Image (tube, helix red, strand yellow):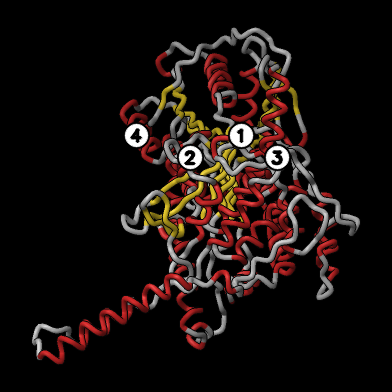
Amino acid sequence: MLLMSSNPLTLVDPPIRRRYRFRALYCGPDRETFDQLIDHMEATEGCRVSPAEGGERVLVTTRVQLTWVPAFTMEEAKASLATLFLNLIVVDLRWADDPVEHEARIDKARALLKMLDEVEDIESRYGFHRIIVLVSGPDGPRIDNLLIELGGRGIRHVLKERRFRGDETPSGFAGRLVSLSEELLLAPRSGRTALCCAGGGITAIYFELGALKCLDDCLATGSANDFDMYFGISAGAVVTSLIANGFAAEEFMAAIAGFEGGRIPPVNLSLARLGHLNLADMRARLRQGARDSVRALVRGLRGDAAGPSLDSAFLRATSLIGPPFRSDNYEALLRSLLTSPGATNDFRRLRRPLYVGATNQDTRRHVLWGDEGLKHVPISKAVQASLSINPAFSAVEIEGAWYEDGAVTRTSNFTEAIRRGADLIIVLDPFLPYHSKEPGFSNRQGILYNIDQDVRSLSFTRFETARNLALRRHPEVRSYTLLPNNRLRRLISENPMDHRPYLEIFRGAYLATLRRIQTVRYRLDGDLALHGIRLNTGDAEAIADRLQAAGDDLKFSDFFVDGEVRLRTPRLSLERLCERLDEAS
């Protein structure tokens, strides 16, 4: 929707103690036009302007300090967009005395908007809701057509100069731009953050823990335990159920590494245990198969022509093969952790909401445990349903319905986070295929490897499509997806249920996450600051040096700055609840 501004010239808001700092990119024809516009802003009541380094100008009002960064060429605009966190972009398409030159400016603006829109990484796309286009001209119908074109490109804010009507001065127009800029910069935000974790087996749990450990080490304020909402599917549900309860990622890492003395005792996620075998289901299917065989034999002896054909007999025989494993032991393990002192196995008692995605096996619809009307099921049971991927694990019965892995119908529930008001979302998705540069590599692998790779490709393609569409519909949402690099993908996907390479996956996840944070830091710094969170990657960089230097002699202690294991122990959900009750009383 295209909005025309009618903001008044004079800023009438009273001075306030806190002045917010922002940065805006001005894209216009030349230095003279830029300086004239900024100079005219100073005529607005309560505004003053001062120069800054690199030709920038600083506008100070009673409410904001806005640094204007000029760009007069496409190359200058690209450089600023690639290195600076920009709260606003202003594109100046006001009338030039020469109609040919004016059309040339419009063509340059089209190229700029196309560059902003057609990015390879949708998460780096600049939100068009934070772009203001300035227009004017003596040809009314031409300007109207331009407004329609801009609206079609997703531009929501256009400021039309009224000097050709003779009722506005340059200072008056500049004042309206100041007012509109303040309105956009200080617009109320939902202020909600979300962590969305996808699935991918035991190796996915390892990746997500390593990534969250790195994220914790990079945050100067806050931690992975301080998101406003948590969404987990399959392996991601295991991780988020603990993080939402208040356990630190490194506590679960320590337990997997066999470290004694933490709040989580040592755990073994190996599937190679007799207790995981789905023996009851095997016996039931064999009994049913025996009964079917006897019936078929009797019909044959009687000469019953209506007996089963060879094809139907073969198809019926396939039902004898069921999932070889049950997930009960994993549920029991998680239940023991979530019922330990201070933790909770009840969605309703969590400090921050947790949503666990599963799939109804019969209706093939996604179910979001923890949502309204679905909070009464124990968290551990919901997670069990979410991780029970067929054909490895049998489905889980809950209240007369059967549920299986949530990844069958969703990848990360990214869109559910947006629907609940999140405007900053961190996504962890280790379920990606390995990209081989060697022709024929996949063809030489076995059937299980290729089935796994096909499912990974389908899952990530589904996620990318849904995410890209959602971010275009909601440009106010900022998203950062943390993925394994290609080398780590090969290790993760060799056997997603392999419990052994935890240290190597922890390390790969940690290093990949730090590289991603360093790459997008110019944007991430600003997005986190809007939520009161600060980055400091010093400790993470020191740990990364230790991890890289460790080589094949990697130890769990290498994930700590000085090589000594000192686990973070955030307050658990019920401990925080008791504190709030004590404060209230």
- Between 148 and 526, the one nearer to me in the picture: 526
User: Residue sitting at 21 percent across and 85 percent down?
Assistant: 311
Where residue 493 sits: x, y (%)? 57, 72
- Asked if residue 404 can be seen in this view, the reply is yes
Q: Estimate how packed mark 3 is, as few (under 14), some (14 to 19) or many (20 or more) residues with alpha carbons within 10 Å.
A: some
Which of the two marks, 4 or 1, is nearer to us in this view? Answer: 1
Looking at marks 1 and 2 on the same chain, the residue that comes earlier in the sequence is marked by 1
Looking at marks 2 and 3 on the same chain, the residue that comes earlier in the sequence is marked by 3
- Between 297 and 398, the one nearer to me in the picture: 297
Which structural element holds mark 4? Answer: helix
**Distance (Cα) linking label 4 and label 2:** 51 Å
Looking at marks 4 and 1 on the same chain, the residue that comes earlier in the sequence is marked by 1
Q: Which amino acid does label 1 sit on?
A: Asn
Which of the two marks, 1 or 2, is nearer to us in this view? Answer: 2
- Residue 87's tag is 1
Q: In which quarter of the image is residue 206?
A: bottom right
- Residue 148's tag is 4
Above or below 538: residue 460: below
**Distance (Cα) linking label 1 and label 3:** 41 Å
- Residue 376's tag is 2
The quarter of the picture where the C terminus appears is: top right
Q: Mark 3 points at which residue?
A: 342
